[in-house]
Image: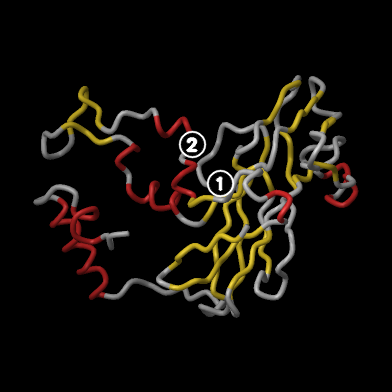
Amino acid sequence: MLKYFKFWGNDVIEFYCHPDYHDVIPEPKPAIKYIPDWFKVIPPIDRERRDNFNDFAMNAKKCLPMIDAMSLGFTIPLCGDLHVKTDEDITEIKVHNPPAIKLAEFHDVRQVGGASYPGYPAHPIKFINHWIIKTAPGWSTLFIPPINHVRTNFTCFGGLVDTDAYPKEVNFPGIWHTGNFDSIVPAGTPLVTAIPIKRNMFNKKIKIRKITTEEFKKIGIISKTQNTRHHVYTKELREKR
């Protein structure tokens, strides 16, 4: 299966899998399709609070910086139903893969520092990814835990792969958080978000300086504007996605 996604107007990333899994395993989707449940249930406005314009106060549901962050990239889901069992203090983790596909195994805890590893003495779980990620020349892929998915049983570690030169499956190790777990982690559970990154797009040497007079003046203008008009960032400063 081959899936192309348009990104900044160019074909820079694609996902494909073995023919045996065509139309079988859940597909990667734009991250906006995986907004966390806790965020979905927040009411857009709070009718018991008022803002500086005496309008009903907005909640996080209306926070475009949060929504823009959670919309960035493409989320890769778990490819099948995986049974996981842990003891009370998560010193032992067991997985049972389904008959037709391998979904998880473990890294040796010594690979992540042994006793200094936050999940010690349990071994880090490694989710097997059956999607190949390929990017255009000069583009890498940043793999991070899905943004603002905080109520989860596990967290995959972040990683950066030059997927233009390595069009091969990338697996996702992580740490398990939930004790006394004895259940199925369902197919489609978000594992990581893949974000295409243009290599060498900025100088890694950080620039630190004091604010200029013109910049200070600009901040003052923005602040005054915010005190005269509603939703200045949303309506006037933010570039539409």
Q: Is residue 222 above or below residue 190?
A: below
Near-viewer residue (9 or 226)? 9
Residue receiving disc 2: 36
Please state which amino acid type lies under the numbered disc 2.
Pro
Quadrant of res 131: bottom right
Q: In this view, does 40 lie above or below 173?
A: above
Q: Gap in Å between the C-alphas at discs 2 and 1?
A: 9 Å
Task: State left or right for residue 74 relative to residue 67.
Answer: right
Q: Is residue 16 above or below residue 162?
A: above
Q: Earlier in the sequence, mark 2 or mark 1?
A: 2
Q: Where is residue 45 in the image (x, y as percent from the top left)?
A: 25, 31
Task: State left or right for residue 89 relative to residue 24.
Answer: right
Name the secondary structure under disc 2: loop
Please state which amino acid type lies under the numbered disc 1.
Pro
- Circles 2 and 1, Cβ within 8 Å, touching? The answer is yes
- The residue positioned 68% from the left and 30% from the top of the image is 185
Specify how the rendered protein is coloured.
Answer: secondary structure
Q: Where is residue 159 in the image (x, y as percent from the top left)?
A: 68, 59
Q: Residues within 10 Å of mark 2 (few under 14, many from 20)?
A: some
Q: Position of residue 121 (x, y in %)?
A: 87, 35
Q: Residue 154 carries which label?
A: none
Near-viewer residue (172 or 231)? 172
The N terminus: image quadrant: bottom right
Quadrant of res 96: top right
Residue receiving disc 1: 146
Q: Position of residue 54 (x, y in %)?
A: 11, 34
- The residue positioned 34% from the left and 38% from the top of the image is 60
